[in-house]
Amino acid sequence: MALGMAGALAGSALAQGAEDPTKTLTILASHAPGGGYDAYARLYARHVGRFLPGQPSVVVRNMPGAAGVVMANFVASQAPRNGSTIALGPGSMATASLLGSQGARYDSREFTWVGSLNNDVSVAVSRSDSPISKTEELFTKELVVGGAGASDNSVVFATILSRMFGAKLKLVAGYNGSGDTVMALDRGEVQGIAGWNYSSITTMRPDWLRDKKINILLQMSLSRHPELPDIPTVLELARDDSQREILRLIFAQSQMGRVIMGPPAMPKAMMEAHRDAFDRVLKDPDFQADVEKMRLEISGPMTGGEVDQLVASLYRAAPERIKEAGALLGGN
């Protein structure tokens, strides 16, 4: 509730101060400073202004809460629609309302989708000093895992593993974003995280991989990451076609990874300008050099039109499968 109120207050101030999109662009980040989404938002902010009409100055404002749902609600109902405000957050924002996530008050099909920076693979991990080091042990030994808000991957994916497959996970939720959850893991408050973006690990804690401080237990995705060829995916746990369909519906969000969107009804000219700028940023040598310097991952990006098509396809899924997926996640 406190996060929601804070987001609303910040949003009101932002809405009242709508800027000329050719002079100032505001990019909202779905998570608190210090995490992967903040890093990607600031990376994009450093380059996109050069490719937009008027070459506007670009500022980043963090609007954390419910894994992007607070921010998405603001973008849907309060953000200026002239192209002066866009937002970067997880692909789960696109499925939250469809699957009945609490507090999601929007229709994802109405957003102006600008593009997605990567196809993000999340992983379930455990500390090397925890009792679990292998995938199969998730179902025989208890693991205390940390999580953020109810719509965050760290909570959603833990729920899936527990409810669908019987994983013995004890979830400690309520941390303020991925950065705080990772700090809890570092301090030993929790023993693992059931949904941590692999690209965030390589960015935030590459030494944990190098020094084997954590075990990667499972890929919470529909396909294996090129760097993790021997780690199974959650789709491989499915026992029948019904489970596979539900998992595909839920994990489509990973295909959208770090997705960028604008408010509904953005003028067509500005939508085209933002989509064109997104495409040009990805090809820009300075942007590519920055990505390499920051050790970030840009893989399998999607254009705004491709995100539009994917979101529309999710809403066309069989109603009974949508209902089952929502029930699995504890939605309405």
Image: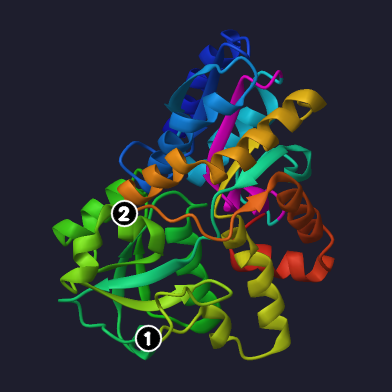
Q: Could you tell whether 207 is left or right of 86 in the image?
A: left
For the magenta stretch, what is the residue range?
Answer: 82-98
Q: Check disc 2 and report the residue beneath it.
A: 203
Q: Position of residue 244 (x, y in %)?
A: 67, 81
- Secondary structure beneath dot 1 equals helix
Instruction: Say which of 247 and 35 sits in front.
Output: 35
Residue at 40%, 39% in the rendered image: 38
**How many numbered markers are drawn?**
2
Q: Which image quadrant for residue 55?
A: top right
Residue at 39%, 87% in the rendered image: 139
Q: Is residue 220 above or below residue 38?
A: below
Q: CA distance from mark 1 to mark 2?
A: 24 Å
Instruction: Say which of 88 and 277 sits in front.
Output: 277
- Neighbour tally class for label 1: few under 14, some 14-19, many 20 plus, Cα within 10 Å: some
Colour option used = rainbow
Instruction: Say which of 150 and 202 sits in front.
Output: 202
Q: Check disc 1 and report the residue beneath it.
A: 135
Q: Could you tell whether 120 is left or right of 36 in the image?
A: right
